[in-house]
Image (cartoon, helix red, strand yellow):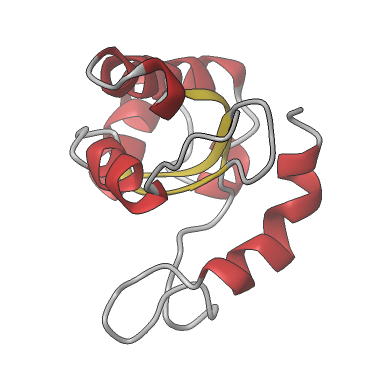
Amino acid sequence: SGGDTISPQHIENQLALEPEIEAAMVVGDNRPHLVAIIVPAKDFIAEWAAHHGKRADLAELAGEPTFRAAVARAVERTNGGLPSVERVKRFVVADQPFTIENGMMTPTMKPRRHAILSRWGATLDGLY
């Protein structure tokens, strides 16, 4: 973003420190700002769903505006501690977790960026 060299992993790790967030993938190569895919934490999904009378089903909740707003608050908390060039401007809530089984995680639990981008690239492009 803007010629600044940023470390997506650093930002992803900061996002994952939030209790609502299990994992994140941040992208922004040659783009005006950063965007991300956010995987909500299982405990947060369960608690939020119970509190709002919904099923704890990520595929359903990912499109729920009030659920997304709760995730957005966690992203904003992370952004508050980052320099402006490292802040995530827009994001999408993943409708499934990153797992070894679905090919989005390596056996050492690192996101497979290529696989995640092949699944989410068009959605991320739509955030610009």
Extreme-bottom residue of the structure = 107
Which of the pair 70/34 is nearer the observer? 34
Give the vertical position of 109 relative to 48 (above or below). below
The image shows residue 104 at horizontal and vertical percentages of: 51, 72
Which of the pair 19/65 is nearer the observer? 19
**Residue 74, image quadrant:** top left
The image shows residue 93 at horizontal and vertical percentages of: 55, 38
**5 left or right of 121?**
left
Which of the pair 112/96 is nearer the observer? 112
**16 left or right of 111?**
left
Extreme-front residue of the structure = 3
Which of the pair 57/79 is nearer the observer? 79
State the residue at coordinates (28%, 23%): 78
State the residue at coordinates (28%, 46%): 10
Residue 55 visible? The answer is yes
**124 left or right of 96?**
right
Counting labels gives 0
The image shows residue 118 at horizontal and vertical percentages of: 72, 67
Q: From the image, which quarter does the C terminus lie in? A: top right
**108 left or right of 85?**
left
**Residue 127, image quadrant:** top right
Residue 53 visible? The answer is no
State the residue at coordinates (39%, 82%): 106
The image shows residue 87 at horizontal and vertical percentages of: 42, 23
